[in-house]
Image: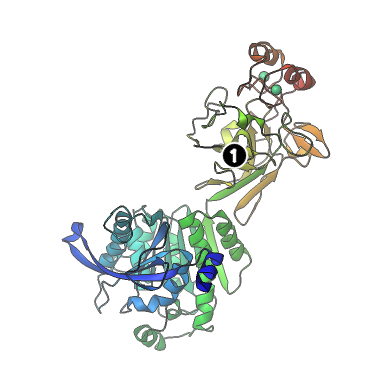
Amino acid sequence: MVIIITNSALSQTYGTGNTSVTYNDPDRNNRSIPTQIFYPANSNGTNVPVAEGEFPVIVFGHGFVMGYSAYEYLWQALVPQGYILVLPTTESGFSPNHLALGLDLRFLVGKLKAEGLNPASLFYNHISDGSAIMGHSMGGGASFLACQNFSDVSAMITFAAAETNPSAIQAAASIQVPTLVFSGGNDCVTPPPNHQVPMYNNLANDCKTFISITGGGHCYFADYNFNCAFGELTCSPSPTITRDQQHAIILSHLVPYLEFHLKGNQQAWITFNNLLNNPTGITSLQSCNIRLIDVKAFLEGPFNGTNLNTYLTGLTDFPLSQPYNVAPWNYLGSEIVTTVPLNVVDWILVELRDATSAATATASTRIASQAAFLMNDGSIRDLDGTSYQQFDNLIIQHSLFVVLWHRNHLGIMSALPVSQTDGVYFYNFTTGVGQAFGINAQANLGGNHYGMYSGDITGDGQIDMTDKNPGWAINAGFKEYLSSDVDMDGQSANPDKNDLWLKNLGKMSQIPD
Ligand SMILES: [Ca+2]
Ligand SMILES: [Ca+2]
């Protein structure tokens, strides 16, 4: 009973189940692939049931003449945190076929996903969408062979990857998935300049990271293994850290990387990037176009002195799909929800521009658009109401400027480039009128708060007579989701016209054309 309470208190830790399976690949003459699988379970044991839930799959390729058992530290660390470790035992002799091992790794990703859909399998309904191919030394090189022109994995991670035949270095150029390349600074078996560095340099994917463990060795990426240690004894330099220290550095970086790429945990991505930016025991390189966007803005209409009212989501016709698919925005994104999260004020359209200055950040410099939810505290969030907006391949050549469009408020653009910390681009429009590009481009809401001007019922960037008639007049009195409801209280009525439209008559958006 005590154990059960402890487990539920930690909630994310699992016991370790183990099963041995021999799969056959029908595409390679039913090639036999004996495999060891370690998985989250409620109790430790062989063939025990999988714990409740769905878990990402990590397929791991072993080093040259190294058994799967050399990686026990890895499954002992990862399985309790909700990962399934899949280790083929093929190509473990003295003349291994590198490509065959790579194809085994690739095959097992698909096979485990199929197991998740197979009612007869131990893993039925326990396989999540996230997956990775990993490997050490020869298995690291084989991971490159596995992932070339193969996008059905979430990420690839390699430990002291060795050049293979065919060439892992050449295969790197054909890899599309996010990649994390670990190397040991004192690895004399596969010296980084001849192995992992050219692999990393050849990667042309959207997000790649290189971590060199200072003083780290080749075999310390595994548990003690006689064959590996024997090879390492005959070369120099030797590691200057201990195996335990190297394992701790590996896991402290690997786990947040996996949590983000395999489980979608954005905070883990921030943690990972923070570790790179404040390195302890490593040096690193990164080239990554994954961007998290965290923008804060207020709307004048629903602002109540403290935050934003959320009356619109109480309307029966509040849209479940983004409403900016009409003129003048003509944004054709497919953003849709089944239920609206708590604290949503309205849909908002976020546009990103890449330019050398705000004045030159014209419409032609747009690099991305995404509809999102404006929350009652002014934060702009993805469709779950809590995540940052995420752009997976946003290439920024100059500086990033963010534009906000709203159905009945004047659009604004950041006056300054949006800078990033640990992979998150943050911009707060609410703290000063000058946060928006132009002259008095935002309304003073009092209390040192600023927000987008209300009253542009036609959405054409200017507040003029057409916003009143026909804009406001044709819908006066209706309790619906209408642009004419510029104070956003759920009804088009006189206060919309008298308190906001009239006050702002003559104002224009100052977003560069
Ligand atoms: Ca207008
Ligand atoms: Ca109203």
In the drawing, does residue 448 fall left or right of residue 35?
A: right
Q: Is any atom of residue 35 visible in this view?
A: no
- Across and down, in percent, residue 451 comes to 74, 34
> Residue 375 or 468: which is nearer the viewer?
375
- The residue lying furthest to the right in this view is 447
Q: In which quarter of the view is residue 173 placed? A: bottom left
Up/down of 495 relative to 142, above or below: above
For the point 19% across and 58% down, which residue is it? Answer: 26
Q: Which residue is mark 1?
A: 352
- Across and down, in percent, residue 251 comes to 51, 71
Q: In which quarter of the view is residue 202 placed? A: bottom left
Q: Tell me how many marks there are.
A: 1
Q: Is any atom of residue 369 visible in this view?
A: yes
- Across and down, in percent, residue 208 comes to 48, 58
> Residue 332 or 367: which is nearer the viewer?
332
> Residue 361 or 215: which is nearer the viewer?
215
For the point 79% across and 40% down, which residue is it? Answer: 432
In the drawing, does residue 63 fall left or right of residue 309?
A: left
